Image (cartoon, coloured by chain):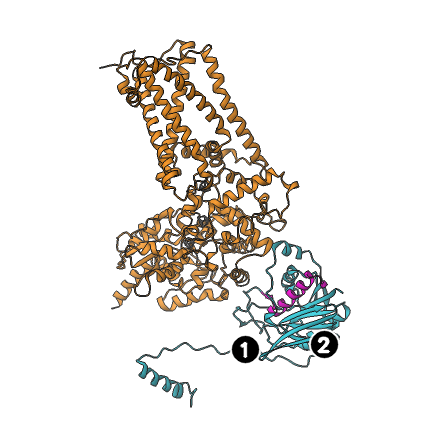
Chain colours: A orange, B cyan
Amino acid sequence: MHTLAAAVTREIYWNIDIPFRGLVIVILGLVPFAIIAYGLWQRWQRWQRMGDGVELPPRDEWWSRTKRTLVQVFAQKRIRRRKQGGYSHVMIFWSFVLLFIGTVIVAIQTDLATPLFDWYFFDGAFYVAYSIVLDLAGLGGIAACCFALYRRYVTKPETLTKRMLTWTPHIWVFLVLLVQGFILEACRISGTGFPDHEVYASPVGNVFAQVIPTGGIAEGLHLFFWWFHLALTLVWLGMFGQTAMAHIFTSMATIWLAREIPVSTPRPIVDIEEAEEFGVLTVDQFINTHLRDADACVECGRCTDVCPANITGKPLSPKKIINDIKEAWLAYDAAGGAENTSDEDPTKRLVGGIISQDELWSCTTCGACEQECPVMIEQVDKIVQMRRGLVLMESEFPEEVQNAFNNMEQQGNPWGKPPDDRSKWIEEIAEEEDLIVPIWGEEGSEDAEYLFWVGCAGALDARSLPITKSVALLIQKAGVKFAVLGPMESCTGDPALRIGNEYLYQILAQQNIEVIKEAGVKKIVTQCPHCFQSFNKDYRKLDGSLDYEVIHHTQLISELLEDKRLEGIPGIDAKAILHDSCYLARHNKVTDEPRNVAKAALGNVAASEPKRCGEKTFCCGAGGGRMWMEEHLGDKNVNAERAEELLKDGADTILTSCPFCKTMLSDGAKVVAGESRDVKVMDVAEALAQGLKKTKTGNNA
Amino acid sequence: MSLKIVCLLKQTLPTEAKISILDTGKPGDARSKPIINPYDEFGIEEAVKLKEAGKASEVTLLSVGTDKWLETIRRGLAMGADQAVLIDVGSEEIDQSQVAEALANQLQKMEYDLVLCGKLAVDTGLGEVPGRVAARLGIPLLHVAAKVDVEGNKVTVERVADGNIVHVEAECPVIVSADKSLNKPRFASLPNIMKAKKKPIDTVALADVLSGAAQTRRTVKYELPPERGPVRMLEGENDAAARKLVDVLVNEEKIVH
Ligand code: SF4
Ligand code: SF4
Ligand code: SF4
């Protein structure tokens, strides 16, 4: 086998002659790291001044958090969700890391291995591999930097606004360093008389070397660039603790400290009866997490890019919100904190000041922003906290919301229908389908396995009743024993919680929790993803002792299909497209089941999907209590934007899995398709049940 | 001068409640959460606004009800009233004239310059109480106010009449009943809801303010209005449908003769 000669190496510190070199290099190298450490220490002090200071997570989570952070750092998982900016970031990152490691290896060879152990490993195959990898890293880095600069100077995507542009100097510096690296390599190759192996070991440097005259000029150039390179590197590294480059550390820390994302459940107000301040109106009222993670925002703008409110022209930009909070806090801190600032101060007073009410009310709490944010910043909780400030402290909210609040409080549902009306569908289905739905605790419910939580929409809203009936019909056909609460059910409080009326939410939630506990319910199946969210996540944050299982109807039906308990249902004939619900797909990661049900309904054909699907779905516009607010801002309504996307390839049926999505998209489809084109919007359960009804009529005939 | 205001407050069912005849024989809806009679709420809002404007010094709520009303009374306190007095009728049944007498007797024990109340209660729809209280106290009633102005001791109200607006004024003490357009009641802030829990509510026994006044009327029974029949769609082209309609109206429903 051909082995590489020991001469295949390069002379480290060729052309460089410094007295006490090792010592000088170590000292010079330590200076920037000391400056970085100082910068980070300052940042840490700043973070400690925010709210009650940084709270460390419980120790048993440390390892999983570390793993999560390493995945984000080295695999750049979230960053890669975006193609252009994402992959150029990945290349710059890896270029930097590899070259940094390369430098460390050289230092190990010259200042540890050789003097201490007289061991020389920097040759042969190792040297060749090392050199090729670093050459490629340099080349990739140059390409990525050029691309990043091209985006900043030429294409200028909207994302890259404001201080995102202050990153440009760093890209320039890195680019210069990379080019210098190749010039140095070229000078050395030329100055050492073009060693043969460099043709393959340093392919890029070798090309550069062709234009460098050999001899003194190469040596002179080399000397100049060597010192220039060293100085620039050291100065640049020294800036890592304070400038935009500090993001390397602040991002890692933020990801490590972050909660599960998307956060989904706004932090409950504990001991609401004892508290005196509720929500956030001035910047100092934010807890540490919110101030700290805002401080780590890299202003990439990805959150705003995916925000349905922003896309449809509403005044909301989550990136702006985050940076308003960050800047306001820095101003507050610079002014000397609580003692030296007044609540009326226009920067300290966030809500109604630099952050308008319209911005806050535009949010659908869809969670898209949180899912995209590479730093795992919590946008939605901040928005809800500020809504709480408005609702609970100042009684400020869109006028129409007061009705919804009153209705939820007095009648237990946002529509304001009498609670007894919740039994209507039960009477109807008994008549229409001969199906007796027992009430929990009453006759016929003795062997009920599931509590079927119908929800306000499911029991009271004309457009949602067919979904409820379809679910009942399907699970009954499969032999599932279930019962409902009928008029004992009340709103889960989801709209109240997300509009910011935590007080009302907690009253409703406690009431439901009590009913569930008293009834001894062990398994719940919900019709609506919002109810699912309440039971699955929100309630558990209020009451840690809840031990029921809860699933969404698509999960149950999908399971029944899989177990062949629902079989042989002829499909409906439609060109169907599937819309994922944010609260199902994004907040609760349920994406396969609605597809399974849709597929069965369509006679074993998968429904088509829009580009924004699954966990990346696009909101229908109803979430965050927006269902109960007028949509009068922006250039189009969120539901129209979504309907347009769903209908652009000629689908005639939109399949949903959420009653609110169904309502919003039916309206949206009417706007987009006009009256002439007949577009059906139905829940996947309805679609499947239609097949079921077909068999029935078939049998009867 | 700064007025002392007393607001009369009755608890009613929400307007959307589904009324049925309960086991007690009375109309009600066990599942809906009761509210402040919306017209009384306009009165409370107006009183709180006057206080905020510095024209009133104190706002007291006064109710004739039971201890089941306490939560509703607290909502009135959360809107900004300072205290409340509940005349507890317990399980006793009294009519509007007795309610008015109890209120008037209690008012006489209290300091007041202005009494604010709703023009009627949405449950009975009667609107007897403001007039009866005014008569018993011998003070002027400014009824169905769409706007209230207070200048020192003088109260001016605007009332919307048929095609004109009437301006009426009177000197305190006076009783003003609120119309719907008077104001938009506030949504109490949470700190105020919490504060309301600590505000005093005095309970007065009915016997102390209603000595032996006999009931002159008796409610015999309550019944639900007949249910509306289902909607019928008549089939056919315009002409045929019209004929059918005439036939139904004349011969079947006997509405047109
Ligand atoms: S939750 Fe949705 S609507 Fe709200 S800011 Fe984030 S992306 Fe925008
Ligand atoms: S909040 Fe996150 S996604 Fe939005 S700009 Fe900042 S870092 Fe980017
Ligand atoms: S209604 Fe549907 S799409 Fe809209 S927020 Fe709720 S779950 Fe998401």
Q: Earlier in the sequence, mark 1 or mark 2?
A: 2
Q: Chain of mark 1?
A: B
Q: Quadrant of residue B169?
A: bottom right
Horizontal relation, residue B244 to residue B98: left or right: left
The residue stretch that appears in magenta: B34-58
Horizontal relation, residue A566 to residue A74: left or right: left
Q: Secondary structure at mark 1?
A: loop
Q: Is residue B206 above or below residue B252?
A: above
- In the rendered image, residue B209, in percent from the top left (x then y), is placed at 74, 71
* Labelled disc at residue B170: none
Most extreme residue toward the bottom, as rendered?
Answer: B257
**Is disc 2's CB within 8 Å of ligand 3?**
no
Q: Are marks 1 and 2 in contact (CB under 8 Å)?
A: no
- In the rendered image, residue A578, in percent from the top left (x then y), is placed at 33, 53
Q: Residues within 10 Å of mark 1 (few under 14, many from 20)?
A: few
Q: Chain of mark 2?
A: B
Q: Nearer the viewer, residue A495 or A628?
A: A628
Q: Secondary structure at mark 2?
A: loop
Q: Give the Cα separation between the discs numbered 1 and 2.
A: 36 Å
Under mark 1, the amino acid is: Glu
Q: Which residue is mark 1?
A: B223
Q: Residue at x 43, y 31 (%)?
A: A170
For the C terminus of chain A, the quadrant is bottom left
Q: Is residue B240 above or below residue A285?
A: below
The overriding secondary structure of the stretch rendered in magenta is helix
User: Is residue B37 located in the magenta-colored stretch of the structure?
Assistant: yes
Under mark 2, the amino acid is: Pro
Q: Residue at x 36, y 87 (%)?
A: B247
Q: Which residue is mark 2?
A: B140
Q: Residue at x 37, y 17 (%)?
A: A221
- In the rendered image, residue B191, in percent from the top left (x then y), is placed at 63, 53
